[in-house]
Amino acid sequence: MKKKILSIIMAVTLVMLTVVGCSSKEVVIKDREGRDIKVPNKIDKIISTAPSNTEVLVELGLADKLVAVDKYSADVAGIPDNVELIDFSNPDAEKIIGLEPDIIVASGHNKTGSTEDPFKLVEEAGISVAYIPSSNSIQGIYDDITFISEVTNTKEKGKKIVENTKSQIEDIAKKGKDIKDKKKVYFEIGSSPNLFSFGNSTFLNEMIELVGAENILKDENAWISPSAETIIDKNPDVILTNDGYIENPVDKIKNREGWENINAVKNNQVYQIDTNSSSRPSQHIIKALNEMAKAIYPNVYNN
C-alpha cells in the first residue's frame, strides 16, 4: 500500500512539474457541472469516461488522441484498437496519471456511489478533469457537444455536428406537429428486478413527443420504476423497448402474464429500439429517433 501511495506521489510530482512549465498556456473555464477547470491550449492525449462522450470525441475527429476510455465505450466505432479500457466506477489514479492525459472528459455517472470526487488525486496532479453530467434534454446534448468541441479546439466541427443533428431532428418534428391522433406509448428500459422507464424531464420523453406521440408516464418525473398494473391500466397503443440485458425482450413483453389485453400487445405493436443510440446522450440519438418514429407511425415516417 505504501509503495502504491509513493508511486502516485512521484507521478503527481512529475506531472505537476510539467504543468508548471506550461501553465501560461492554460485557460480557465467552467465545465458542464459549473466547476472552474484549467484547460491546456494544446491537447494531444484524452481520456473519456463515458460512451456518450467517446462518441462525440470520435465524431470530432479526435479518436487518435484517445489514450483510455471506459469499458462501456469498447463498442464505439472508430476508437483505436490499442486504447486502454478502464473501469471508472473505481478509477486507478496511478494508472490514469501514468497515461499523462492532457484532459479527462468525465461523466456525472463516475460519481455515483462515491462520497468524494473519484478524480481528486488526478486533478491534484495537475490534470484537467471536465465533468459532463448526463443531459436530460436534447438541447443539453447540443450543449455537451459544443462544450467538448470548445475544450478540444474543434469548435467548427462541433458546430457542424450540432447543426446536422438539429436539421435531422427538425425534419422529424415537422411531421410530428401535424399528427392529431396521438398514440399512447410505453417505453421500457429494463424489466429486472423491476420495470424501468421514464417520465418527463428526459430526452427520451422529448423524443416521443417530437414524433407526435404521448408517453403514458409523462406525468411522472425523470427515471422511474412503474408497476405492471400501471402499464395495464394506461393501455398503451405502442410499446418500445431498448432493453439490452435480456434476450428477445419483445417476445418477453408480448408473453407477459396479464398484458395480453393491452392494445400494443393485442395489435402486435411492440418494437425493439437500438439500445446504444437511445441510451447515450450524443448526436447518435437521431438513429433511435428515426426508429421510434417509424415504429409508432410507419405510414407517416416510412415515406
Image: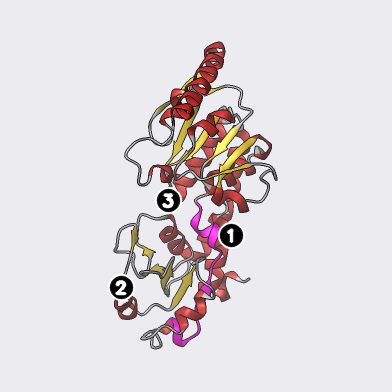
Specify start and end residues of the magenta stretch as a single range.
Answer: 264-280
Task: Please say which color scheme the image uses.
Answer: secondary structure
Foreground of the two, 34 or 169: 34
Q: Quadrant of the image for the C terminus?
A: bottom right
Q: Earlier in the sequence, mark 1 or mark 3?
A: 3
Residue 120 in the image, given as x and y percentages of width and height: 41, 30
Q: Residue at x 69, y 37 (%)?
A: 64
Q: Which residue is mark 1?
A: 287
Reply above or below: 79 against 156: below
Q: Which mark is residue 227?
A: 2
The residue sitting at the front extreme is 2
Q: CA distance from mark 2 to mark 1?
A: 29 Å
How many residues crowd mark 1 within 10 Å: few (<14), some (14–19), many (20+)? some
Residue 267 belongs to magenta span:
yes
For mark 3, give the secondary structure.
Answer: loop
Q: Residue at x 45, y 64 (%)?
A: 208
- Camera-near label (2 vs 3) is 2
- Camera-near label (2 vs 1) is 2
Q: Residue at x 54, y 48 (%)?
A: 51
Residue 249 in the image, given as x and y percentages of width and height: 50, 74
Q: Which mark is residue 137?
A: 3
Tell me: 256 left or right of 292: left
Q: Earlier in the sequence, mark 2 or mark 3?
A: 3
